Every structure is written in C-alpha cells, then in structure tokens.
C-alpha cells in the first residue's frame, strides 16, 4: 500500500525538500531492527491496516498477509513472535473509543485483537476531558552487522491510523531520521523545545506518567535539526506564567515569525475551520506579528469534489469573520477532474479521487518564510481560546513542526469569490461523555479495569475473549480520585485469553483493548486466533530456527517440523563411504544444508556425514544466537534474546523427538545444540 503524502524531509545533513511518497517507509539503514515505537492517532486504530500494512513494513516481516491456509498462519505467527519480542515496546495513544465495532458481538476482536496483548494502547482523559488529535510516530531503530549505530526516526503528520486516512486521503508530513549518541545530554534535550514536555503531558493524561519516558530519553540522545521548531497543544487552561515557560497552542506561534520587518502574512491550508470571530482572529494573528488582513485561507467552491460528504467544513459565521477582518479566500481547483487538473507535486498525477486531510500553514515576511506541518486544524479547539487575563484554554492534544519555507503550488492560487465558497451553517461541538478514559490490564490471573466516570452513572462492564463475554461483578471508587472507578475480573479460563473490555452506560459504550502484563515466558504461550493449535508449535519452532540462520520455514509442505527433505536418505550412506572419508582424513567440503538447491542435505559429490553436517547446522544457529546476545544494546534486548535462548533449547529438544529413530543423524545434532545452549544460558553476561 502506498500512502500519499506531501512530505517535508530533514536529512542528517539538515537539508530540506518536498517529496511525494508513501508514509509507510523508513529512512533507517536497511536491515535495522525496530527496537521501540510510539504512534499517536485520533480515531480508533484500524487493526487490519495496522497488521497487514504498517507492522509488516516497520517490523520488516518476510511474509505477506494476503496468503491462504498455512501460508497465512506463518505470517501471523511471524508477526506474533516479533510483537512478543517487542512486548510493551510499542505504544499507541489515542482518544477514547466510543463506537461499537461492526459485526456480530461474538466476532469482536477475534481477527486481530490479539495484537493488543503485546502492544500497549493508551487513551487520554485520565485527568479530565481531553482529545488526542496529534499524529506523531517515533521509531527507535537498532544497529546492523554493518552499521552498529542506532537511529531515531520522527514523523509528524496529519495522518490517523485508519484505512481511510492512509488510502482515501492525502496527507502532509515531516520526517527526520537521526543518529543516536551513546549517552544522553540535557543540553541536547533542551534543543527539542516543547516536544519532551508534550510527551510527558500526553503520558500523564493517559494515566501512566512514566510510560513515554524512554522516548524522551531518545530525544536526549539525538541532535535536533537546525531551524526546526515544534509547536504543541495540551488540553486545559494555561496561565500567562505557565505559557512563558511552556508556550502551548497559539503561544507557540511567538517563536516562529519569519525574520524581517513588517506584518507577517499567513496562508492556511486545512480541511476544517472552527468557530472564529473577529476578535479571536486578531488575537491569533498577533501571536506571530500578523494581522487578519494578511490572512489567506485556501478553500474550495461549492462544486468541488471534496464538498461531497462535507469533507471540508467552513462555518458561515467564521467566513463572515474572515471577510470582515480583511482576510482573503484562495481558490483550490479540483484534483480529480482530468489529467491536467491541479497537482500538489510534480509526481502527483490526476485524476485523483483522494481528498486532502493535510494541515499546512505558511508564514511569510518579505522573502523569509516558515512552513508549519501540523495536526492542528484552523480551530480554537486546537490552538486555544485566549482570555482577558492572558490565559489560554485548549481542548486538543496537537503537534506540529515548523521549518524554513519553500516554493510550492499553493503559491499560484487565485482568489475565490466568497459567494462561491463551500460552507456550512455551523459545526458540531464536541459533547462531553459520562466516561472519558479507561484502561484494562491482565496479569495472568485477573483483569484489572479502571475508568474515569461521572459519579451518577450506572456503569456496567464485560470482558471478551473472542468467544464469550464475562461480566464485571462490581465497581468501587478509586482511593486517589473519586471520579475514577475500578473493578477486577478473576480469570479462570486456562485456554482463553482476554482481548477486549466493554464499558456501557445508558448513553453509550466504550471499548478498551486488554494489555497482557505477563512475563515473556508465560505470555509467549498465547497464539493468534487463526492459527491451528495442532500445528502451531512445529511452525513456531521453524520460524525460530529461521530467525537464527535455519532454512526458511515452508508454509505449504514443511508441516511436521522438518528442516528440509533430504535428496539422499541416510540409509544410502554405506560403511564404505565412511571408510573412504576416514582414509582421506577429511571430506573435500562440508555441505551447508541451507545452501543446497531443492532443500537438499548434500549434493552427490559431497562426502560429509549427515550426522556431522546436521550437528554443524544446528550449532551454527546457537552461534548466531550467542553473537546477537553478546552484541545486545540494552537490557530489554538482552532479556528478549535470553528468552529466545530458552525457546531454542526447548525447540531443539522437540526437533530431536520429532526426528526420532527415522532420522537419527538429525536427532543427534538437535540434541547437541540443546545441550550447548543450555550450558550458555547458565553463564553470566560477563562470562559470555
């Protein structure tokens, strides 16, 4: 899938340029493994998009999700193994999810709900009403054999994690991939402006203040690109004194005005305009030394394709305020009428049925420009409402990045007659919900539920495992906050895993993924719902062997756990052949099973004994595992690799049992590998 975006790129050399490209890509060196990731989004994550498109790209899976039968099961198992190794290292933050999932209740979460056992899903609103509208990706990449360095990739965009956002819309994005230093630096961290504080406030609103600290520490190891300024909004009312030290919302515009003299002109390109009046427009413009008369809003006419379904919204009252203040509308032509229609970039080809969800602001004074790529629509909810005492009230979490400007097609637009502008009578305001935040955690024995809820609400709850709902028997008030309620659901099902919690009240319902806080070795026993339990263990062993240098697991034929089908049966190796090898002292070549064509153990000209060959092959996997363990870059990676070592030991024992008496040579090799790795696991990190 290609996700189109007008991307503003910052390279290691600090050059900037526009590109027309997919968001689902990475600038990290080829082969770099993902170590951790943070994704923020407004709407509920589209699990199908996440599993079948985003995760395969960033986890660099070797299999495709659209296979059938066992081929698809191998994909799901490979994804599951990657997620378990990254257990609790991938975090998603969104607003609370109030809508029900489509389809029969028995199918809720049954397809891909199991990913949330390893991926921590947080929602904002623990401290009060909040909307998570920022679109931030932070990807921590590890080193490769050729490149030992680590990288932090940051993407700030307008894209939610939904299928429509990444297939039916065009987005704007800023991307940077930065080398990480080995040690943190407080001075480096300070260069990132409000971004570290934004992450801290996001975690606090999600009810888990420490959860995003690791991503803040990554910023302390990376050099912020020159001429880059982050602008962020955090819900709440912020005093004048607070805004001096942490300029949230419109207060952040103070630091991005282009150099020079004279009034700053602002050009705004976004699909949603909130409720503005003349005074609010004046205060917004004053923050960057501008004026409403120098304000230009790029907009569509009534016949534009994007007017269908009210994808772009401009209240009539806000249009009146812009016109009364001297602002101008610029006409945005259709992008889908013909091949000669307006294009955002040279590589943008029409006709294009997608509509723009991008939010871009251009600030200009003379020839000096600053370009802001952000999640924030032109709305007081995003930027804040300024009060007489200088305080600002903000409703949304928003994030943007401001860089030196550039020339692009939006410079060439003509004026739009306001009488032809597409507008609506008004925009709906966000209504407060009786339940604003919740989380669900399973510790292996009990599902712990917690939510922020109005005191007079009759709250009910249930936990779903893909088969049945288990009702919550009772709620209690949290000791530290009377607006929060807690409940525990004892989990007695040995063979079923909780996936989803649903909290309901008279006016609505809230869906909450259940996070699995098991230790890795326990959590590792769970499987994706589509995988055949009878074949799962052998398939998992094959994938584990493949990870450490074994042959690629065969999704169609290699079901019983065998590595490859031998072209020369062990029975054909006669005593005469063995004597010939002994007499010569050594074979000409020791065949590598993974290099043989047609999955053959040894070509006819090879004189290697199968037992020796298979032992070397299995032990090479042990060596590969040990090498990775010795090069582990942090505690989590070391712990994950040691867990893999324990899994390899068990897999080698199972492999020996499978091969049994019919393939004695392989069985001996698997037993030797199991014994070798058992010895290594007993050694301390220093001894290794």
Image (cartoon, rainbow, N blue to C red):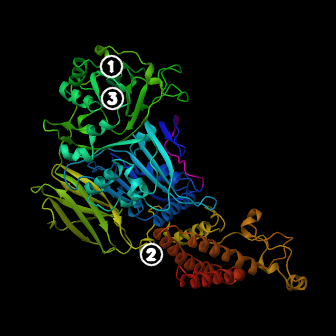
Q: In this view, does 679 lie to the left or right of 262?
A: right
The answer to whether residue 315 is above or below residue 547 is above
The answer to whether residue 687 is above or below residue 272 is below
Category of crowding for the residue at label 2, using alpha-carbon neighbours closer than 10 angstroms: few (below 14), some (14–19), many (at least 20): few
* First to last magenta residue range: 18-30
Q: Which comes before the other along the chain, label 2 or label 3?
A: 3
What element does badge 3 sit on?
loop
The answer to whether residue 298 is above or below residue 500 is above
Q: Is residue 241 visible?
A: yes
Magenta-span inclusion, residue 311: no
Task: Report the number of discs.
Answer: 3
How far apart in space, not on screen, are marks 2 and 3 (Cα)? 50 Å
Q: Name the residue under label 1.
A: 329
Q: Name the residue under label 3.
A: 312
| Callout 2–callout 1 Cβ contact below 8 Å | no
Residue 482 image-quadrant placement: bottom left
What element does badge 1 sit on?
strand
Q: Nearer the viewer, residue 490 or 145?
A: 145
* Quadrant where the C terminus is found in the figure: bottom right
Residue 644 in the image: state x and y as whole percent: 53, 73
Q: Which of marks 2 and 1 is in front?
A: 1
Q: Name the residue under label 2.
A: 521
Residue 511 in the image: state x and y as whole percent: 28, 55
How far apart in space, not on screen, are marks 2 and 1 (Cα)? 60 Å
């Amino acid at each position: 899938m290609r996700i189109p975006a007008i991307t503003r790129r910052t390279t290691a050399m600090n050059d900037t340029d526009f590109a027309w490209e997919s968001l689902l890509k990475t600038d990290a060196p080829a082969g770099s493994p993902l170590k951790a990731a943070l994704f923020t989004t407004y709407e509920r994550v589209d699990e199908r998009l996440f599993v079948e498109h985003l995760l395969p790209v960033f986890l660099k899976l070797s299999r495709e999700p659209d296979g059938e039968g066992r081929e698809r099961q191998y994909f799901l198992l490979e994804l599951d193994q990657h997620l378990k190794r990254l257990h609790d290292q991938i975090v998603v933050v969104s607003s609370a999810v109030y809508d029900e999932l489509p389809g029969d209740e028995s199918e809720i979460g049954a397809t891909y709900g199991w990913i949330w056992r390893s991926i921590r899903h947080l929602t904002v609103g623990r401290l009060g009403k909040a909307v998570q509208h920022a679109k931030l990706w932070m990807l921590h990449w590890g080193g490769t054999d050729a490149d030992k360095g680590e990288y932090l990739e940051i993407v700030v965009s307008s894209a939610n994690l939904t299928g429509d956002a990444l297939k039916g819309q065009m987005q704007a994005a800023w991307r940077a991939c930065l080398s990480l230093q080995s040690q943190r630096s407080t001075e480096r961290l300070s260069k990132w402006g409000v971004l570290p504080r934004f992450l801290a406030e996001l975690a606090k609103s999600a009810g888990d203040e420490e959860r995003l600290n690791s991503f803040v520490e990554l910023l302390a190891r990376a050099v912020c690109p020159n001429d880059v300024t982050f602008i962020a909004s955090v819900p709440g009312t912020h005093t004048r004194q607070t805004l001096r030290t942490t300029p949230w919302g419109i207060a952040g515009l103070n630091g991005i005005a282009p150099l020079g003299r004279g009034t700053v002109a602002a050009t705004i390109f976004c699909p949603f305009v909130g409720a503005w009046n003349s005074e609010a427009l004046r205060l917004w413009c004053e923050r960057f030394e501008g004026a409403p008369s120098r304000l230009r809003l790029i907009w569509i006419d009534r016949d534009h394709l994007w007017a269908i379904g009210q994808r772009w919204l401009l209240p009539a009252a806000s249009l009146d305020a812009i016109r009364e203040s001297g602002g101008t509308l610029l006409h945005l032509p259709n992008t889908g009428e013909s091949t000669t229609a307006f294009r955002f970039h040279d590589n943008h080809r029409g006709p294009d049925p997608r509509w723009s969800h991008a939010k871009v602001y251009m600030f200009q004074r003379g020839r000096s420009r600053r370009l802001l790529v952000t999640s924030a629509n032109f709305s007081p909810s995003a930027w804040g409402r300024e009060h007489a005492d200088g305080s600002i009230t903000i409703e949304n979490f928003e994030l943007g990045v401001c860089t030196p400007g550039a020339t692009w097609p939006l410079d060439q637009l003509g004026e739009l007659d306001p009488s032809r502008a597409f507008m609506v009578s008004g925009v709906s305001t966000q209504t407060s919900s009786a339940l604003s935040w919740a989380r669900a955690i399973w510790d292996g024995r009990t599902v712990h539920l917690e939510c922020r809820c109005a005191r007079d609400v009759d709250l009910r709850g249930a936990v779903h495992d893909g088969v049945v709902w288990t009702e919550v028997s009772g709620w209690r008030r949290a000791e530290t906050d009377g607006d929060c309620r807690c409940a525990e659901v004892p989990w007695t099902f040995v063979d079923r895993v909780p996936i989803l919690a649903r909290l309901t009240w008279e006016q609505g319902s809230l869906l909450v993924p259940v996070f699995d806080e098991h230790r890795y070795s326990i959590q590792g026993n769970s499987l994706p719902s589509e995988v055949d339990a009878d074949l799962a263990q052998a398939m998992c062993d094959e994938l584990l062997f493949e990870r450490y240098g074994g042959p690629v697991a065969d999704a169609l034929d290699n079901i019983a756990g065998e590595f490859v089908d031998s072209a020369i049966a062990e029975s054909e190796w006669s005593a005469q052949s063995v004597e010939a090898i002994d007499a010569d002292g050594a074979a000409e070549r020791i065949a590598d099973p993974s290099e043989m064509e047609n999955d053959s153990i040894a070509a006819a000209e090879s004189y290697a004994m199968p037992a020796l060959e298979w032992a070397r092959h299995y032990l090479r996997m042990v060596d590969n595992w040990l090498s990775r363990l010795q090069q582990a870059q942090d505690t989590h990676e070391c712990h994950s690799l040691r867990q893999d070592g324990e899994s390899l030991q068990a897999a080698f024992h199972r492999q020996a049992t499978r091969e049994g008496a019919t393939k004695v040579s392989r069985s001996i090799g698997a037993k030797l590998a199991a014994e070798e790795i058992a010895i290594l696991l007993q050694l301390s990190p220093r001894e290794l």
